[in-house]
Image (tube, rainbow, N blue to C red):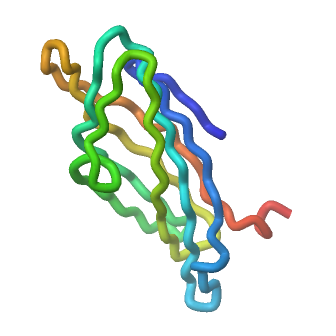
Amino acid sequence: MISKISEGVEISVEIFYQSDYSNPLNQEFMFAYRITLENHNNFTVKLLRRHWFIFDSNGEQREVEGEGVIGIQPILKPGETYQYVSGCNLKTEMGRMHGTYLMENQHNKESFKVNIPSFDMIVPFKNN
């Protein structure tokens, strides 16, 4: 698991290769990731938007941006956590993701960015 605290919000990431949804012969590699957000601030925060940067090991890059995560804009009171699972497809056996969440302080309505730590997605047999 990879974790990072940015602007008082801890982001933890776990990555899982999805062999049942992958087709290596067609250069389709599917990964799932579980993200846990924990609010270490003394104020309530709301996740407004996500912005991902996705890199395949063949040099291809993509960006994904949008409201909330999996259709939700979670609100976290001080000390609360929120967890979700999403996925990413790659055209190669290895890749990397990182990004930011745009959060809002619910006390003063000011927005701020939280960094999502960079994480690698590697097909298990590549680690041998």
Quarter of the picture containing the N terminus is: top right
Residue 49 drawn at (x, y percent): 24, 43
Instruction: Pick the residue in front: 43 or 2.
Output: 43
Quarter of image, res 103 = top left
**Residue closest to the eye, 95 or 111:** 111
Residue at position x 53%, y 70% in the image: 58
- Residue drawn at the location 58% of the way across and 32% of the way down: 3
Q: Which of 93 and 19 is in front in this view?
A: 19
Residue 16 in percent (x, y) is at 64, 59
The residue lying at 49 percent from left, 23 percent from top is 5
The residue most toward the left is 109
- In this rendering, the answer to whether 70 lies above or below 37 is below
Tell me residue 64's x, y (percent): 31, 58
Residue depicted at x 39% and y 43% = 99
Which residue appears farthest toward the top when viewing the image?
42
User: Residue 88: percent from the left, percent from the top?
Assistant: 47, 64
**Rendered view: 6 above or below 125:** above
Q: How many labels does the image show?
A: 0
